[in-house]
Image (cartoon, grey):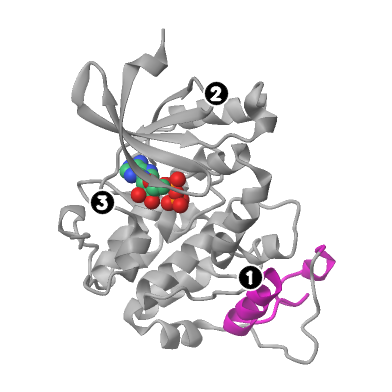
Amino acid sequence: EDVRRKYVKDKKLGEGTYAVVYLGYLRDNPSSLVAIKKIKVNAEYRDGLSMDAIREIKYLQELSHPNIIALHDVFSSKDRNLNLVLEYLPLGDLEMLIKDGNIQYGVADVKAWMGMLTRGVWFCHENFILHRDIKPNNLLIASDGEVKLADFGLARSFADPYLNMTHQVITRWYRPPELLYGARQYSAVVDVWSMGMVFAELLLRVPYVAGNSDMDQIAKISEAFGSPTEENWPGVTKLPNYVPPGDRITPLQGREFFLRQFPTAGPLGADLLMSMSTLDPRKRSSAREILQHAWWRSDPKPTPKESLPRKS
Ligand code: ADP
């Protein structure tokens, strides 16, 4: 049956590096809105998307969770571009809220947003999917205030490799040290590091470690959290892009440091942030462990999603 005919494409909603996004609706039910994301497919894929890519899409289509954007359908348009039919999320993203000086929010709101993010990531990991690109701009907001993880590396894996580099510049700030060091084998806790950076940014309202190159990113991470060494991270010196700190070794930061930098989080919040930003991925908490942390149950309680601040 023709999926392409099932939807009607309406006005353009926006454009990103890899895709143009349109508002759309079901032909049979014009009140059911969707977002149609038309991916600028790289020529290499035009004559047949790789089996891996198709498998990944199929898998995402089956993932159903309140904090993960729903992927309703996939079709190729006449120009042979790939179209993803996604849940329509009209309230923007967390980056817009962080940057909007007219919006005030507090730690109870941060707790609600981080809770939704953590539940979404936990569900992905339970299903053996890594997101790999968690950042405020990829956390979209539904009309009821629910935060949804969007942009699963899909767009990236189909798009033009030359565009890819500009994209990397944007996401560097959320990249974990093991990836910056060029680790070939990595685990789900890459996403947990990114969650920690989002947490810090929500609290400070500016990106916490914002390097202007990969080397600079590593330097800033080392200054902030401590220099990676064989003592605090066994094996780190063997990673492909490891650079010795020279004589500028920063000691590994402890709880007091996190509490001083993020006083509004309180001692439990600071402890939770520390467990997300642990340099050695083997010692970093998993999404499941994060969900069990006492911070969520401590006061102030997370704001109900309907009462969260939203864009005007
Ligand atoms: P970027 O990652 O640069 O934001 P995208 O291609 O993901 O680029 O999206 C482009 C724009 O389209 C976004 O800024 C947003 O305004 C809009 N958009 C994307 N996805 C959705 C969606 N599911 N619902 C509503 N608007 C969306």
Q: How many marks?
A: 3
Is 259 situated above or below 86? below
Q: Quadrant of the N terminus?
A: top left
- The picture quadrant where one finds residue 32 is top left
Q: Residues within 10 Å of mark 2 (few under 14, many from 20)?
A: some
Mark 3 or mark 1: which comes first in sequence? 3
Q: Secondary structure at mark 2?
A: loop
Q: Which residues are magenta?
A: 213-240
**Relative depth, front residue between 186 and 133:** 133
Mark 3 or mark 2: which comes first in sequence? 2
Mark 3–mark 2 Cα distance, whole angstroms, equals 30 Å
Mark 3–mark 1 Cα distance, whole angstroms, equals 34 Å
Is 17 situated above or below 126? below
**Disc number lying in front (1 or 2):** 2
Is 39 situated above or below 106? above
Q: Which residue is mark 2?
A: 80
Tell me, yes or no, whether the highlighted magenta stretch contains residue 217: yes
Q: Which mark is residue 91?
A: 3
**Disc number lying in front (3 or 1):** 3
**Disc number lying in front (3 or 2):** 2
Q: Secondary structure at mark 3?
A: loop
- The picture quadrant where one finds residue 309 is bottom left
Mark 1–mark 2 Cα distance, whole angstroms, equals 43 Å
Q: Where residue 283 sits in the image (x, y, percent)?
A: 62, 65
Q: Which mark is residue 296?
A: none
Q: Which residue is mark 1?
A: 279
Tell me, yes or no, whether the highlighted magenta stretch contains residue 51: no
Residue type at the position of mark 3:
Leu
